[in-house]
Amino acid sequence: MEHIPILKMYEFLLVTIQVDMHDRLALALQDDLTERIVQTHARGVLIDISALDLVDSFMGRMLGNIAAMSRILDAETVVVGMQPAVAITLVELGLPLKGIRTALNVEQGMAFLRTVVG
Amino acid sequence: MVVLKHETVAVRSDADIVHARQLVREWARQQGFSLVDQTKIVTAASELARNTLHYGGGGTVRLDVLNAGSRVGLQLTFKDCGPGIPDLDLAMRDGYTTGGGLGLGLGGAKRLSNEFDIESQPGQGTCVRIARWK
């Protein structure tokens, strides 16, 4: 089965979603990330969604789950690079992604994780 | 109102949902929808296709390019022969779900569209039609 690659950089895990995800792929990412956090003792997770041209309620829920699970495992999650059209659509859909930390781009996301981890 | 073009595709798997939304994206782009409007109708399509698959047990989506006077629209009709929805008002309510999701699919798809109709017969299936005009 396909998996989305997870890169480790120091105490952070980096994920770039570059494919139009079907639901099982999104669920696999959720499982893979939690496993990798435990394995690597990662303190932060950065998810780059700049290549995604839609986030629907299923993917939104998956991002929320990842943030919640990471937090329980003592890692902070930041979602970066959301396209403006996706942000507008998410709010209208009724899913403002509460509880998910976001940043405009990878640099700002990394800067945020560094401050949190200290 | 004239139908300029139409196509019907199956919604029977995760991969079909991805295919359906890619087709909707392509058609919306071809008709000159703005990026925000494309994203709205593609997201609505993704929500409704998932409902067709998970609650309706699979079905079809028909895409229509409509022309009314000087206006062009994209209409999507999702049909399944599943168990139907016993209480439509309840199903439309945000946060209500029988499937463990967020309960945003129907209400969200309605907010993302200019037109929205739903018909459901318990035991016979559900048909949801949305349209977005340029």
Image (spheres, coloured by chain):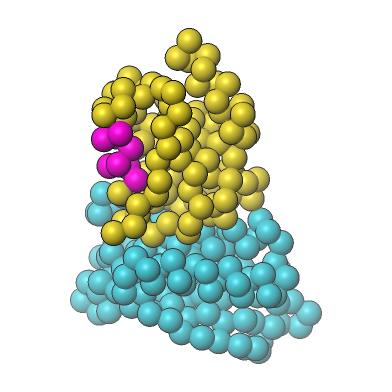
Chain colours: A yellow, B cyan
Identify the residue at image location x=65%, y=45%.
Answer: A84
Asked whether, in this view, residue B56 is left or right of residue B119, the answer is left
- Quarter of the image for residue B4 reads bottom right
Foreground of the two, B64 or B116:
B64
Foreground of the two, B120 or A26:
A26
- Magenta-colored span: A29-36
Q: Position of residue A74 (x, y in %)?
A: 33, 20
| Residue A71 shows in the view | no
Secondary structure of the magenta portion, mostly? helix
Residue A33 in magenta stretch: yes
Q: Position of residue A90 (x, y in %)?
A: 53, 47
Identify the residue at image location x=45%, y=14%.
Answer: A117
| Residue A58 shows in the view | yes
Identify the residue at image location x=42%, y=75%.
Answer: B78
Q: Position of residue B97 (x, y in %)?
A: 29, 51
Residue B64 in magenta stretch: no
